[in-house]
Image: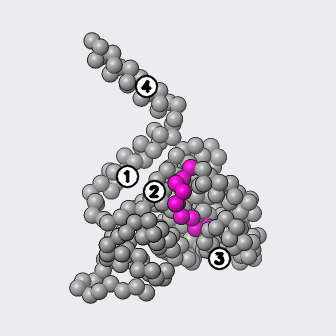
Amino acid sequence: MATAQFIRRDNEKRTARKQNHPEDLEMAKADQRFGQRDGSDQNFDYMFKLLIIGNSSVGKTSFLFRYADDSFSNSFVSTVGIDFKVKTVYRNDKRVKLQIWDTAGQERYRTITTAYYRGAMGFILMYDICNEESFNAVQDWATQIKTYSWDNAQVIMVGNKCDVGEERVVPTEKGKHLADQLGFEYYEASAKENINVRQVFERLVDIICVKMSERVDVEPPMVPGVKTTRLTDKPPQLPQKCTCA
């Protein structure tokens, strides 16, 4: 009888936690989808959790789709909550699985999306070079990264939609200056024209690997000390020795 009462109380507590913390329920749902969509592929050396964050409409979803699927659509559909894609790349002889989360920029989803900052190894902090409000929000997003993520999370700041030309309102120099102040590397990119999309992800993964090598003595060394080591979607050719570009 006592056991039954304990189980009932425990179930009531779990239900209350889900009601009080809806972001935990959303995370559980998303993690379940991740397991269903990718559970069969467990053959990798490392898995990095990456997040793309920034105001709504800056192009986060298009940026992810361009990188993961090499596709682009002019139609705009606002991300609800959070979504993700998985992409596997090869760095030297290591298979690295990227779990890339696309977050909603609207304020009403902020509680849910910040819950995903935990465990993220890298962030792409994005603004729209045609939207000064999205640029002004970068400081707030940077503060959220510092507040909710771990200390060694790496960040690259991206000014998206660099293909627009005369519609630009945020100069390149202004974006670069802010990135320098925040201690982030800076790129301008275009998901539409596929400018610097792959380069941003390659560089972010490279930085993470460098930080890993500084903290852990890996044998053989994962990072040979060359910043321009290139990622590829294809496995290394064997028995040829993998080289760095």
For the residues labelled 1 and 2, say whether their Cβ atoms are less than 8 Å apart.
yes
Residue 61 percent across, percent down from the top left: 54, 61
Residue 13: numbered disc: 4
Residue 172 visible, this orientation: yes
In this view, the mark in front (4 or 1): 4
Q: Amino acid at mark 2?
A: Phe
The residue segment tinted magenta is: 148-158
The quadrant of the rendering that contains the N terminus is: top left
For the residues labelled 4 and 2, say whether their Cβ atoms are less than 8 Å apart.
no
Of the pair 147 and 159, the residue shown nearer to us: 147
At a point 28% along the width and 17% down the height, the residue shown is: 3
Tag 1, which secondary structure? helix
At a point 37% along the width and 52% down the height, the residue shown is: 34
For the residues labelled 3 and 2, say whether their Cβ atoms are less than 8 Å apart.
no
At a point 74% along the width and 60% down the height, the residue shown is: 136
Tag 4, which secondary structure? helix
Residue 163: numbered disc: 3
Is 205 colored magenta in this rendering?
no
In this view, the mark in front (4 or 2): 4
In this view, the mark in front (4 or 3): 4
Instruction: Return the residue at label 2.
Output: 84
In the figure, 107 relative to 245: above or below? above
